[in-house]
Image: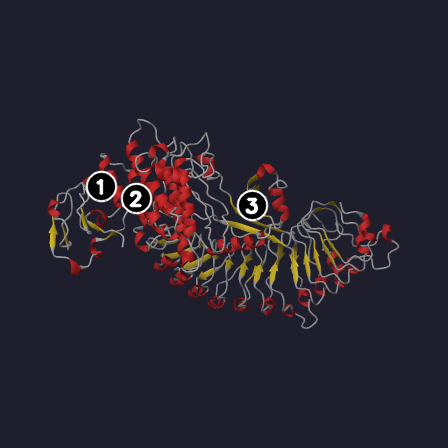
Amino acid sequence: TIPQEIGHLSNLKQIILGFNSLRGTIPARIFNISTLQRLSAPYNQLLGTLPLHTTHQLANLDVPNSLGNLGLLEILGLGDNNFTSEPSSPKLSFITTLTNCTKLRVLEISNNPISGTLPVSIGNLSASFDGLYARGCKIRGTIPNEISSLSDIPSTIKGLQKLQQIYVGYNKLQGSIPNDLCQLRDLSGLYLQANQLSGSLPACLWHIRSLRYLYLSSNKLTSRIPASFGNLKDLLVFDASLYSLHGNMPSEIGNSKVVTLLDLSYNNFSGDIPGNIGDLQNSVRLSLKHNDLVGTIPETFRSLVSLETLDLSQNNLSGVIPNTSMCLTINYMEKSQVGDLSETLQASLSCRMKLYGGATQFGVRPCKTNSADRLKTLRKVVIISVSSTISLVVLVLMSILLWIRCGKSKRPPVEIDLQPVAEHRRISYQEIQEATEGFEENNLLGNGSFGSVYKGILFDGMVVAIKVFKLQQERALKSFHVECEIIRNVRHRNLIKIVTSCSNPDFKALILEYMPNGSLEKWLYSHNYVLDISQRLDIMIDLACALDYLHHEYGLGGSISTSCDVYSYGIMLMETFTGKKPTDEMFAGQMSLKIWVKESLPNAVIQVLDKNLLTRGRKNSLTEVDCLSSILKLALDCAAESSEQRINMTYVLAALKKIKVVVRNPPKQRANVNNFLARQEKPELSLWQVRRSEMSEATLRMTGLNKRTFNPSPNCQDPQKAKLENDSPSDAHTLRIWSMEEKAMATQSGWDEDHWSCSISAPAV
């Protein structure tokens, strides 16, 4: 508790007691300190009511016995406690006592069960008052007109020229939104959600060009979105769900090109979706659910490259989603790899991504599930790139959600019930403390150089991973800012998502998406779980996807080396398939994991493989050995001593995917596997990439292959004599004819005819 004796410190200027576990009430004697300039006690467990009036214990005070005694007080922070209002008065009468605090700038009372109405005396607060934070206080009634008197200059709210954000969401405010709000030219955030406001929006609201965040959801407002909405060119978030908006969606909505969240669900919009909605290229979440929209889905949806959540359900839309609109799901691939949406992206959109409602009618088949085993079908690998230039810190290595794909079932396809991604939320230190049970060691997931990661359960039941930074470490603060910047700028399905952050001078934490199945280490070295070759390949392919994406993003700057990441990936690839840590006790002196693997190739690879990968007598074990040998060779190429000799992640990703083809569809003859894998070690050129000037006309006709007219090099082997086993001539250019077995394998893997009919391979230049 706060000791009573603190009231005897007559020269005290500041009392800062936040981020502790203080209980009880605030001693009345504190308000006897006339020199007090700052009183801060947020994020505690304080109870009771504020001691506003004289009591018999304070009879000998020389100053007025109220909070108004604190004439030099600038900031009063009482948020996130359990304060209640005076039972005898429905109004928040303690605000009246603050009118004598002529220096007061900020009053923070959020997340207290105060439950009352705002008094008219709020208009008598100091002229310098610029911040009232009362979110989650169950405040009811109307916003008093006297709020416009908070300045001595004009008699309206426009006098608050410095006011930038208004947080009054999740209360019971009634009445309409006053036009005077439009005079706040510096207003960047207006949070009015979850109240009982009625009427229409002020038309002038759309002319506040400084607005960044506009939350109007869950009110009784009725209005249209006017064409002047296009004036809000810097708007980042617009949430007007459950609002009763009506009319057509204006085409000017596409002018807000930087918006990241647009939620217009559960309204009464009619007409078509405007075509220029594709201009919202930064949009991460778009929801138009439960309206009366008609017509076809605009082709411009293909431009929504940042989109992660799309909800068009419960409308009267027709047609299909444009076949390249969802590059968000494969934004690490080239557009040419997208293909037909209904075939290529059905698993990505129905199983991994959040595509809501009507998936079938839009050309995306729902994912099939096997309800018998009820195993989750999503997998996610989480990585953050580590750069040798700026020493980016890895947040979370990775997690496995079980790599059982959307399996076939005898039952009809079942629509998956996917919930929307939670938007950015505010969280207090107290909630973090409660979520982790006081940072209990049993909730500790791991420790790092700059912080510790805890498992936590928020008040709404959401399970999260909380990374708490050790600010006493020299570079921890920089690491916090760097990680925030990374997560803010990159979006990929294999990168961890941030729920929110908590940042105060003495405490900084990132609240991250929780990966329930733990780390790769848990699965590799557990006696209870065994990952097969296919599952390990899936993990490393997902990891390569994310690294390839990050290398492309950061490589555009030209100043960041990615070779360090490639080296680390190579070592991890070896560890994943050998089951040996680089720090294993067997690696002493000159021996290392890399040397151990290198010495095993090509003839003794079985001696270094994880014993759980190969079982004697198991079908296709020789095929698997060939695949694993190629994987370890690829890992060594990643971990080359010279950075110039290391291959890039784009090539690694392509090679692993081709190896996966063999693992999933093993041929009958081992020789074909060896040939197939050997061909992947050199970059291939398409038949049509070879210069026509070097060729002569010829026509190829072979059983099982389509007729092709092509221009082979004069030095090439006669195509009529080319063997299906792919005998290699001595010339630099080689005509390659795929066998029927290879053709079937490629077809099953989704390769089109141009890949297997005929091609020319060339050594790397």
Real-space CA distance between mark 2 and mark 1, rounded to the nearest whole angstrom: 12 Å
Residue placed under numbered mark 3 in the picture = 466
Can you name the residue that lies furthest to the front here? Answer: 589
Viewed as shown, does residue 441 lie left or right of 153? left
Q: Nearer the viewer, residue 259 or 390?
A: 390
Badge 2: how crowded within 10 Å, few (<14), some, or many (20+)?
A: some
Mark 1 or mark 3, whichever is nearer to me: 1
Q: Which residue is mark 2?
A: 658
Query: Could you tell me which quadrant the N terminus lies in?
Result: top right
Q: Nearer the viewer, mark 2 or mark 3?
A: 2
Whichever of labels 2 and 3 marks the residue nearer the N terminus, that label is 3
Question: Picture coordinates of residue 654 (x, y %)?
Answer: 32, 48
Where is mark 1, residue-wise?
A: 742
Instruction: Tell whether label 1 touches label 2 (CB within 8 Å).
Output: no
Q: Is 47 on the left or on the right of 572, as rendered? A: right
- State which quadrant residue 690 falls in: bottom left
Q: Nearer the viewer, residue 190 or 380?
A: 380
User: Mark 1 is on which residue type?
Assistant: Glu
Task: Count how many numbered circles sit on residues in the image.
Answer: 3
**Residues under labels 2 and 3: Cα distance?**
38 Å
Under circle 3, the secondary element is strand
Q: Earlier in the sequence, mark 2 or mark 1?
A: 2
